[in-house]
Amino acid sequence: MTDRKALIHCRVSSKKQKHDGDGLHSQEHRCRDYAAARGYVVEAVFHDDVSGGGDFMKRPGMAALLRFLKHRKRDDCVVIFDDLKRFARDTIFHLKLRQELAAYNATMECLNFKFEDAPEGQFETMIAAQGQLERLHRRQTLRQVRDGAP
C-alpha cells in the first residue's frame, strides 16, 4: 500500500443536474473507492456544477483545485476523476488543463481511461474532441427546441 495523496474532482454540467440527480455524489463515491483500492489518501474533493466547455478557470471547483495544488508542499499528488469527459469538454482547454496540472507535478488518473505514452494513450485528445462535439450538438439542439425549429 502507498500513502500517496489524492485529490478528487467531480463535475456535472448544470446546477439542475446537481440538485435533481446524484451525479456528484456517485462520482465522488466511485473516485473514493478507486483511491482506497490503490491505497491513496484523499486529501480534498472539489465539485463543479457547470459545463465542461471553455475556460476551466471559470469552473469554481477546478480553480480551487489548482489553487490547492499551487499552495501544497508535497509533489506526490494524483488528481482523480471518474470519466475523461468530466475533465473537460473542449479540446484546447483539455490540453491546457493537463499542462497546468503537470506544472504542479500532479498526475491524473481516470476510472475509465489509462493515461500512458503508448499509442492508445494518445487517443485522449480524440475523446476530448468527441466531448466537445457532443457539447456543441447539445447546445444546438437546445437552441432549436427553444426557437421552435423543426
Image: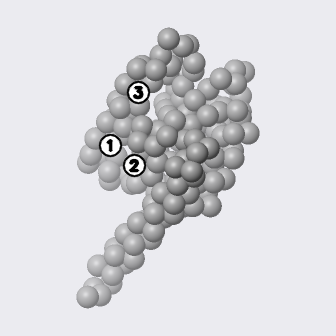
Per the image, label 1 sits on a secondary structure element best described as: helix
In the picture, the disc for residue 145 is none
**Mark 3–mark 2 distance (CA, rounded to whole Å):** 19 Å
Amino acid carrying mark 2 in the image: Val
Residue 136 at x, y = what percent?
A: 44, 71
Vertical order, 57 against 53 (above or below): above
Q: Earlier in the sequence, mark 1 or mark 2?
A: 2
Is 55 situated left or right of 46 in this image?
right
Residue 9 versus residue 4: which sits nearer the camera?
4
Amino acid carrying mark 1 in the image: Gly
For image coordinates 46% across by 43% down, the residue present is 113
**Which residue lies under the disc numbered 2?**
12
Q: Earlier in the sequence, mark 3 or mark 2?
A: 2
For image coordinates 37% across by 37% down, the residue present is 27
The answer to whether residue 89 is visible is: no
Tell which tag, 3 or 2, sits nearer the viewer.
Answer: 3
Q: Earlier in the sequence, mark 3 or mark 1?
A: 1
**Mark 3–mark 1 distance (CA, rounded to whole Å):** 16 Å
**Which residue lies under the disc numbered 3?**
34
Amino acid carrying mark 3 in the image: Tyr
For image coordinates 57% across by 37% down, the residue present is 108
Per the image, label 2 sits on a secondary structure element best described as: loop
**Mark 1–mark 2 distance (CA, rounded to whole Å):** 6 Å
Image marks 1 and 2: residues in contact by CB distance under 8 Å: yes
Vertical order, 46 against 92 (above or below): above
- Circle 2 Cα neighbour tier, 10 Å, few/some/many (<14 / 14–19 / ≥20): many
**Which residue lies under the disc numbered 1?**
23
Per the image, label 3 sits on a secondary structure element best described as: helix
